[in-house]
Image (tube, rainbow, N blue to C red):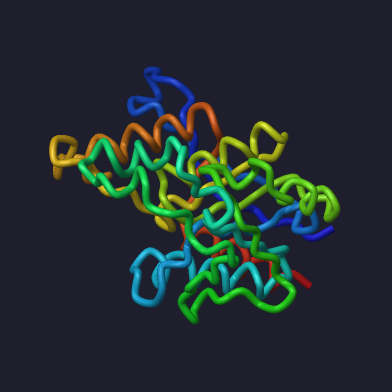
Amino acid sequence: MATIQLPVRWYSGYGPDNPDGNRFDDLNLSLETTAFMIVDSDCGEGNPYVEEGIAPALKAARAVGMHVFFIHNDFSLCDELGSIKREIHGTRWGSEDAADRPAPERSPLQPNYSPSIQPLAHEPDFPKREWSGFHETHTDYHLRCHGIKTLIAVGFSQRSCLYFTCAGAVEHNYRVVMLRDCTHSAEYPDTVDDSLPEGGWLHKIMLRNFEHVVGYTSTSAEFVQACSALSTVP
């Protein structure tokens, strides 16, 4: 059985030999039971996290025959007059029309992917109607049909839909490795801190929380290298 040896990072607590709380090791992942998951990345062409991070990682996953699937937002069937999301994202911000505008057309949303990550014909793309791609979707059913145990996760945003999807995956007993340079969350004005490697406190805390209670992280380059090493094994 083909195995990918992927360097990962997680939070393991502070100690005399571990001043920043991070621990690094390798995970040996069975190619047969690992899938590459792209969440809410239908943002068109030119996004640097897509073009420089997700695209090369996706190319490497496809090159070794890893199972690939997509998840995207589609609120066409759940954007109702009484939706709490209209308040959270609309009326409390001063958008009065959010409360009483008519429901949108019920035709399915057509995602707008960059050509660099356009789903192939055999790669499923599951619509979701909440933050998590595991909430009332066929994602879990699909993965169980293919015997998947581990997910390589990329997409947007790191503090919202990608995060909740990864947490949902763990609730369904999947191991999750997020490629931390294949996602992004904008800082708030009062959380920006250029002295931090992450660029701000929001990104630092969300990464720390993920690496503590959800799963592991790696990088696009490390994943590409791990796939390349697999492809050279006789």
Q: Quadrant of the C terminus?
A: bottom right
Judged left or right of residue 221, residue 143 is: right
Instruction: Give the x, y percent position of residue 133.
Output: 60, 47
Up the image or down, 23 lies above or below 4; here it is above
Up the image or down, 83 lies above or below 60; here it is above
Up the image or down, 64 lies above or below 188; here it is below
Q: In the depicted view, which residue is nearer to us: 118 or 18? A: 118
Q: In the depicted view, which residue is nearer to us: 151 or 71? A: 71
Q: Quadrant of the N terminus?
A: bottom right
Up the image or down, 141 lies above or below 109; here it is above
Instruction: Give the x, y percent position of residue 231.
Output: 69, 72
Judged left or right of residue 58, residue 1 is: right
Judged left or right of residue 208, residue 226 is: right
Seen at 26% across and 36% down, the residue is: 92
Instruction: Give the x, y percent position of residue 134.
Output: 65, 43
Seen at 48% across and 34% down, the residue is: 211
Instruction: Give the x, y percent position of residue 31.
Output: 75, 58
Seen at 31% across and 44% down, the residue is: 90
Residue at far bottom of view: 115
Q: In the depicted view, which residue is nearer to us: 87 or 136? A: 87
Seen at 72% across and 54% down, the residue is: 34
Query: Number of labelled discs?
Result: 0
